[in-house]
Amino acid sequence: MRAVPGDRVLVRERRAGEGDREAVILEVWSEHGRPPYVVGWHDGSRKLFFPASADTLVAGGPGPVGDAEIAIGLS
């Protein structure tokens, strides 16, 4: 997976009742766009994030999650 600041990550529900979450990639620490990333969550928190294989990268910044989804961990 390769990301740039402004891309979004959709994190699928990991525990029952938790729900899906979405974050914006704020910083990319590797020169090739690979994890880890600093992401901003909708609650305003910023965290270091290592995506799991079930998470989804949405390229191109804000907008509804849809056809632009690319599975993380496959590249």
Image (spheres, rainbow, N blue to C red):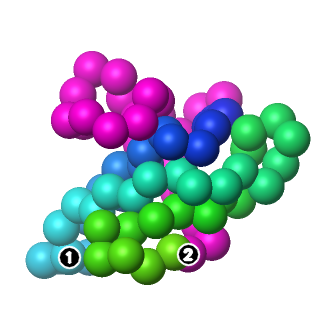
Q: In the rendered image, which residue does mark 2 sit on? A: 47
The quarter holding residue 16 reads: bottom left
Q: Main secondary structure of the magenta part?
A: loop
Q: Is residue 65 magenta?
A: yes
Residue at left 41%, top 36%?
61
Asked which secondary structure carries label 2, the reply is strand
40 above or below 54?
Answer: below
Residue 69 image position (x, y, % from top left) = 37, 29
Q: Nearer the viewer, mark 2 or mark 1?
A: 2
Quarter of the image with the N terminus in it: top right
Neighbor class of circle 2 (other Cα within 10 Å; few <14, some 14-19, many 20+) is some
- Asked where in the image residue 26 lies, by quadrant, the reply is bottom right
Query: At x 37% / y 76%, what residue is drawn?
Result: 44
The reply, left or right, for residue 71 in relation to residue 19 is right
> Disc 1 residue type?
Glu
Which residues fall within the magenta stretch? 47-75
Q: Nearer the viewer, residue 30 or 70?
A: 30
Residue 61's tag is: none
- Rendered position, 17 above or below 35: below
Would you name the residue on which mark 1 appears?
18
| Position of residue 18 measured from the top left corner of the image (x, y, whole percent) | 20, 76
Residue 22 lies, in percent from the top left, at 32, 57
Q: Is residue 15 above or below residue 6?
A: below
| Circle 1 crowding by C-alpha within 10 Å: few under 14, some 14–19, many from 20 | few
Q: Which of the two discs, 2 and 1, labels the residue nearer the N terminus?
A: 1
Which residue is at a point 44% across and 53% down the rendered structure image? 24
Q: Is residue 20 magenta?
A: no
* Residue 57 seen from this side: no
**Amino acid type, residue under disc 2 in the picture:** Lys
- Secondary element at image label 1: loop
